[in-house]
Image (tube, helix red, strand yellow):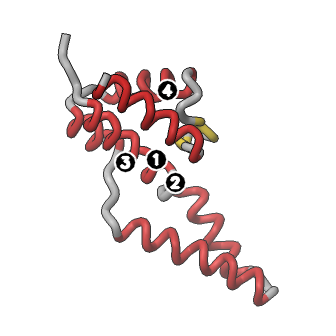
């Protein structure tokens, strides 16, 4: 059995959360771009432009993929997915349409649990 540090797991979860909240599927990106081009109302177009700008900014940051995260932590993608499902069962994160969402309460509980296992 291999030991994995709590910090490596914490870092991987943080990276996964960033990825889940900054990457859109190609079809959603295309729909957003089409809506921007066709929107007649200035306020709505401005809102869509802000969303597009945020999407572009996220792409420029070169955020890690699940494959890179699993490689950095030293586990397979399947193992990463199993651990994400387990964290969801423990109510330490939520999956929403395949995206990881961690509320402040979940983050604080996760931090407390990790501190307990690391520091006793």
Task: Indicate which label's residue lies in the foreground, 2 or 4.
Answer: 4
- The residue depicted at 50 percent of the width and 41 percent of the height is 107
* Residue 97 lies in quadrant: top right
Would you name the residue on which mark 3 appears?
Answer: 15
- Which circle marks residue 101 in the picture? none
- Is 18 placed left or right of 27 in the picture? left
Quadrant of the frame with the C terminus:
top left
- Is 115 placed left or right of 32 in the picture? left
**Discs 4, 3 touching: Cβ within 8 Å:** no
Q: Secondary structure at mark 3?
A: helix
- The residue depicted at 63 percent of the width and 40 percent of the height is 96
- Residue extending farthest to the right is 41
**Discs 1, 3 touching: Cβ within 8 Å:** yes
Where does residue 86 sit, x and y in percent of width and height? 49, 21
For the residues labelled 1 and 4, the Cα–Cα distance comes to 13 Å
- The residue depicted at 46 percent of the width and 34 percent of the height is 110
Would you name the residue on which mark 1 appears?
Answer: 17
- The residue depicted at 77 percent of the width and 86 percent of the height is 43
Callout 3 environment at 10 Å: few (<14), some (14 to 19), or many (20+)?
some
For the residues labelled 1 and 3, the Cα–Cα distance comes to 5 Å
Would you name the residue on which mark 2 appears?
Answer: 21
Q: Is residue 33 above or below residue 107?
A: below
**Discs 3, 2 touching: Cβ within 8 Å:** no
- Which circle marks residue 87 in the picture? 4
Upstream in sequence: badge 2 or badge 4: 2
Q: Secondary structure at mark 2?
A: loop
For the residues labelled 2 and 4, the Cα–Cα distance comes to 17 Å
For the residues labelled 3 and 2, the Cα–Cα distance comes to 10 Å
Quadrant of the frame with the N terminus:
top left
- Residue extending farthest to the top is 1
Callout 4 environment at 10 Å: few (<14), some (14 to 19), or many (20+)?
some
For the residues labelled 4 and 3, the Cα–Cα distance comes to 15 Å
């Amino acid at each position: 059995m291999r030991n994995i540090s709590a910090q490596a797991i914490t870092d991987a979860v943080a990276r996964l959360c960033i990825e889940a909240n900054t990457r859109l599927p190609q079809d959603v990106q295309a729909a957003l771009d089409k809506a921007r081009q066709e929107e007649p109302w200035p306020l709505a177009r401005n809102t869509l432009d802000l969303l597009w700008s945020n999407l572009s900014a996220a792409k420029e940051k070169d955020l890690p993929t699940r494959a890179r995260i699993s490689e950095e932590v030293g586990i397979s993608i399947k193992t990463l997915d199993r651990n994400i499902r387990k964290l969801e069962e423990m109510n330490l994160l939520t999956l929403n349409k395949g995206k990881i969402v961690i509320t402040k309460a979940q983050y604080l509980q996760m931090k407390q649990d990790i501190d307990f296992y690391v520091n006793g």
